[in-house]
Image: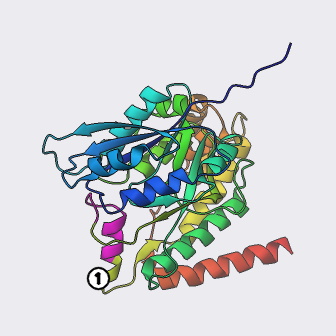
Amino acid sequence: MRQIKLTPQIAVAVPVRNEVARLPGLLLALAQQRGAPAFTLCLFLDECDDGSAEVIQGMESQLPFAVVTRSCNQGRSANAGAARRRAMELALDVAPGGLLMTTDADSQPSRNWLAANLAALRQADVVAGKIVRSASREPDRLDRLCAYYDRLHETRRLIDPVPWESFPSHHWTSAASLALHARHYVELGGFEERPAGEDAALADAAARAGLRLRRDGEVLVATSSRRKGRAPGGFATTLAALDTCAEEPQVAHPEDEVWRFRLQAKARRVHRSENMTELAAEVSLSMGEVMQVARVSRNGEAFASRVVCAPPHGMRMVSLSHAEALLMALQTDMLKGVA
């Protein structure tokens, strides 16, 4: 008897708040997806009064995918987490047992974005895409910060490799490109209704739940470099702050980050074993506390994420320049150790 391979339902969730100028770019980018099965675009129109709804209506008949919308016009202030949660609720209605993806209304996924997400989800539970910006713009501080964080994440995976990570990888966990199974989104409780950082919070929750988070360098989304965004504390706010700050950005001391990476690698190795004395001492917990965390952690990923927090002395902050030099020295020492 011939087996029939069922294609999961796919819903792409996007919150929209007065994006009349940028919505066409998003819709066209999604219309140009290659090698992707059918999907439904779920748009949550959050207090839109600029004609965004009319743009969608005008283009909908020309798009090669279904579009569903839901609107809210109650005079609420901008809240990125709440708006994304509403968009994902709509996506769950469309694909309750399928795959959920999310991006931003001012972004343009690459032509293989959906197909690359599907390929990545065959190896992981949650996929975070890489966020890029126009190459024609003037370089800014964020470019340097991103390069540093990419190198730091590379160092992390040298110290603490996991089989589901991609190569090339990256440091981003942005809601401008996240994908996961609907059942996992429900398990995690969805995006928190916070003004900013709802994406990082979901990624942290996924790790603590033992889900495999893959930062895939083949999943690309181009986003705008605007300095005035739709919600406080978001990407635009970060860019504006970097422009105007007289001092260099401060980042966590790379030695403290490497301490965390090494202990997370150790936690993976000793999970489900009885030999946790050394780990307990290093994370400044009692054996009873460590064993309790191990009992409630479904796997090594959950255990490593839960039991290893900040170093006993706390996370030190240093200037970006200092951190770059320190990380370079750390990487050099690591390579010498391998040679």
The answer to whether residue 173 is above or below residue 154 is above
Residue 263 position, x and y percent, is 63, 54
Task: Report the span colored magenta.
Answer: 229-241
How many marks the image carries: the answer is 1
Looking at the picture, how far across and down is residue 111, in whole percent?
60, 57
Q: Residue furthest left?
A: 75
**Looking at the picture, how far across and down is residue 20, in whole percent?**
29, 58
Q: Nearer the viewer, residue 43 or 208?
A: 43
Residue that label 1 marks: 244
Mark 1: few, some, or many residues within 10 Å (few <14, many ≥20)? Answer: few
Image quadrant occupied by the C terminus: bottom right
Q: Is residue 12 left or right of residue 287?
A: left
**Residue 266, placed above or below residue 171:** above
Which residue shows up at 42% across the image and 47% down it?
A: 201
Q: Nearer the viewer, residue 183 or 109?
A: 109
Residue type, mark 1 in image: Thr
Residue at (55% x, 75% y) in the render: 148
* Name of the residue lying farthest toward the top: 1
Camera-side residue of 200 and 23: 23
Q: Is residue 251 left or right of residue 80?
A: right
**Is residue 233 rendered magenta in the image?**
yes
Residue 79 falls within the magenta-colored stretch? no
Regarding residue 311, the answer to whether it shows in the image is: no
Q: Helix, strand or loop at disc 1? A: helix
Horizontal and vertical percent position of residue 275: 72, 40
Quadrant the N terminus occupies: top right
Could one spot residue 149 in this view of the protein? yes
Q: What sort of colour scheme is used for the picture? A: rainbow
